[in-house]
Image (cartoon, helix red, strand yellow):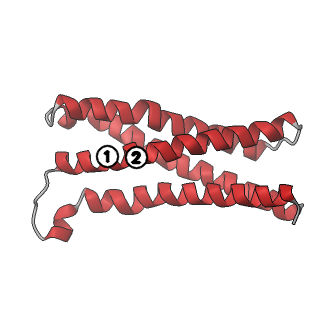
Amino acid sequence: MRVGRLAEAVYIVFLAAVLGAVLTLGAVVAPVIFHSERFLQQEILSHYQEGLIMTAIFLKTNYILNFAAFVILIREIYDYKRFKRDLWILLSATTALFSIFMFTLYYTPDIVAYQIAGEEMTKSEIFAKIHKGSEIDFSLLALSLAVLAVRRAYLLKKG
């Protein structure tokens, strides 16, 4: 296998790993954390406390997401500069970058600010809208990573 094809395969595996992390957080971790009473057989944590735990997890994950954004940006600019342009890759990579930065630089800091302001602030309608926006953004991130990884795999196989 040529070095370029190997690097492309590593990039695809990396995208799949980041996608796996996003899906795991959204589909597994969040539902367990926010319904801890089901697993503890009693309500030990308030919804606010569950939110603090989930935020701590996302704060750590944001490092991975920002690193992923850097890798995607460098990789996709490299092909773009070489005139290897694909509409699906351009759209999905741009959407992934936008979603990552919206999540790590907008939604997470806003949610943290509301949590610091206290439990009552996290019960406001504005906080609910910000939180819903972050969920939609995270779903968009998962979709764009999936499209990017599948398209890259297709192009690698195609040769």
Residue drawn where x is 38% and y is 43% of the image: 59
When asked about the image quadrant of residue 29, the answer is: bottom left
Q: What is the CA distance from the residue labelled 1 to the residue labelled 2?
A: 7 Å
> Residue 100 location, x and y as percent?
53, 40
| Observer able to see residue 126 | no
Label 2: how many Cα within 10 Å (few below 14, some 14–19, many 20+): few
The kind of residue on which mark 1 rests is: Ala
Q: Is residue 64 left or right of residue 88?
A: left
Q: Is residue 30 left or right of residue 2?
A: left
Residue 56 - label: 1
Residue 11 vertical position relative to residue 32 in the rendered view, above or below = above
Secondary element type, mark 2: helix
Secondary element type, mark 1: helix
> Residue 149 location, x and y as percent?
68, 56
Please state, as top left, top right, bottom left or bottom right, where the N terminus lies in the image: bottom right
In the rendered image, the residue lying farthest to the front is 3
Residue drawn where x is 45% and y is 31% of the image: 105
Please state, as top left, top right, bottom left or bottom right, where the C terminus lies in the image: bottom right
Residue 60 - label: 2
Label pair 1/2, CB-CB below 8 angstroms: yes
Q: Is residue 101 left or right of residue 127?
A: right
Residue drawn where x is 19% and y is 68% of the image: 38
